Amino acid sequence: MGFDQRRAASLVALLSILACAPSNGAMAPTAARPVSGDTGAPGIGDPDFPLDGNGGYDVSHYGLELGYTPSSKRLDGVATIKATTTQALSRFDLDLSGLDVSEVTVNEEKAIFSRNGTELGVLPATPLGNKADFTIKVSYSGVPKPIKDSTNLGTFGFVPTPDGAFVACEPDGAKTWYPVNDHPADKAAYDFAITVPDGVTALANGEQVGEPTTADGKTTFRWRERHPMVSYLATATIGKFELRKGRTPGGIPNLAAVDPKHRASLDDLYNISGEVTDYWSKVFGPYPFSSTGGIVDDFSAGYALENQTKPLYGGFEPDQSIIAHELAHQWFGDSVSIKRWRDLWLNEGFATYAEWLWAEHKGTNTADRLFQTFYNRAASEPMWKYPPGRAQPKDLFNDSVYTRGGLTLHALRKAIGDETFFTLLKTWTADHKYGNVTTDEFIALAEKLSGKDLKPLFDAWLFQPTKPAT
Ligand SMILES: [Zn+2]
C-alpha cells in the first residue's frame, strides 16, 4: 500500500477523527463450542489478528461468481472454494463480514452453518478426514459494507461507488465481499465471473478469459489469476472505465484502466507501469505474474493498493514514485508474502526503498541522499520510537514501517555492498516465489550471502525504539 502524497495532510486530519471513533472491525469472540479435536480454529494463528483466517484447512482455489448492481449496491455471490484439510474436521470456519448466506454445501451435501461476528461456522454433513480435498460452496447476497478503521487509514474492502465498486482489501477486508480464509498465510488461485449491467466494466486480477458475454442487459466478465494470491490482493473493481491494452516494451501484457474523470492519466499510467515493470524485472528478478497494469478509480481513498497484477489508485493520478512503489510490491508482498502481519516491513520497507531506487534509476536523486535526508530526522521523531520490524496491529501502516523499513535496507546495502545486496534481493524473490516468509528468514539469507553477522544491524534498525547509530 502506498499513500498519495498530496492527500497526506488531509489523511492525517482524517486519522485523528477515525482514531476516536469506535472500530466496526471489532469482533465478538466466537461462541463457546463443544470441545473437540476435530474443530478448526477460528483464527489461522496470527497473534496480532486472532480471528483472521481460520485453522484446519488450506485453500487452493476460489471460484467467485458475482452479480453486482451499482444502483442498488446489491451483490449476489456464489463462492466455490477448493481446499485441503490439515486435520480431521467436523466443523470449521470461513471469514465473512455482513451479507446474508442462503446455503452452504460441502462436497455437494448441504451443511449446517452459523454466523458469529465475522466468522461463518460450517458443520459438514459428513466429517472430513485429515489431508482430504474438499469443496465448499457458499451462496450469499446483500449490500457489502466496507470496513472503516484507523489501522488502515480509512475505508477498505468492497466500497460501493456511484458507478460500481472500488475494491481494495488490505489488511482484512476480503471478507466484506466473499467467504474466505482471510489471512495472507493462505494463498490461492482465483477465477472470477462478474456480471454487471451493460456498459459497466468489471476488472479483476490476472487476465481476462474470453470476451465478455452479454444477455438480458447484463454483461459477464471473466478473469483468472492462476498464480497464488493473498486474499487482501483480490479485487473486483467495477465501473465506467477507459482502457488501454498492449504489452510493455519487454513483452509483458499491460492493461491500464481509468475512470473517465481521470481520462488524462490513461497514457501515463499505461506507459509508466510498463516501464517500471520491465525495470523491476531486471533489478528484482523475472516478473512473477502473467500481466501488469493499473486502475485509477474515482473513490478518494487517499491510498493505492498493490492488488495482484492491477494496482488500484484511489481517486488520484499516480506519479512515477507511487507506481514504482505499487509495482515493486508485485515481488515484495504479492509473490513473496508475509506469514504474519508483524513482518509488514518486508512489504512496505521494500516498496519504499524501491521508490528510492527508481529515483536513482531516473537520476532525480540517489538512495544515499534520500537515506541521509530521512536519517537526519531528529532523535525525538516518532519514527525512531516505533520499531518497524514489529508492526503493531493498531498502527499497522505507521510511517516507520515504510520509511525506517527503507532505511534498514539502505543500511544493509552499505554494510554488505551493492553486489551482494542486489544478489540478495533476487535470491529472496526467487527462493520464496509465491510463498510466505518471515523477517528471520530474510536476516538468515542476508547473513548467508554476505558471510557477515548482521544481527546487530537488523536489531538496531528493526527492533529498537531508538534512532540507530550509523
Ligand atoms: Zn506499499
Image (spheres, rainbow, N blue to C red):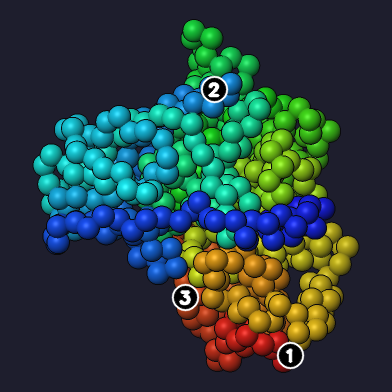
Viewer-closest of 370 and 95: 95
Q: Name the residue under label 3.
A: 441
Which of the two discs, 2 and 3, labels the residue nearer the N terminus?
2
Amino acid on which disc 2 is placed: Ser
Identified at 22% across, 34% down, the residue is 105
Q: Mark 2 points at which residue?
A: 72
Amino acid on which disc 1 is placed: Thr
Percent x, y for residue 401?
Answer: 63, 70
Which of the two discs, 3 and 1, labels the residue nearer the N terminus?
3
Q: Badges 1 and 2: C-beta atoms under 8 Å apart?
A: no
Other-residue count near label 3 (Cα within 10 Å), few / some / many at <14 / 14–19 / ≥20: few
Percent x, y for residue 412?
Answer: 66, 81
**From the viewer's perspective, is the residue at label 2 or at label 3 nearer?**
2
Question: Which quadrant would residue 452 be assigned to in this image?
Answer: bottom right
On residue 81, the disc is none
Local SS, label 2:
loop
Which of the two discs, 1 and 2, labels the residue nearer the N terminus?
2
Question: Which quadrant would residue 198 be assigned to in this image?
Answer: top right
Percent x, y for residue 87?
Answer: 19, 58
Distance from Cα at disc 1 to Cα at disc 2? 57 Å
Q: Name the residue under label 1.
A: 470
Distance from Cα at disc 2 to Cα at disc 3? 47 Å
Residue 223 visible from this viewpoint: yes
Identified at 69% across, 61% down, the residue is 16
Q: Is residue 79 left or right of residue 219?
A: left
Identified at 52% across, 67% down, the residue is 393
Other-residue count near label 1 (Cα within 10 Å), few / some / many at <14 / 14–19 / ≥20: few
Local SS, label 3:
helix
Query: How many numbered circles does the render carry?
Result: 3
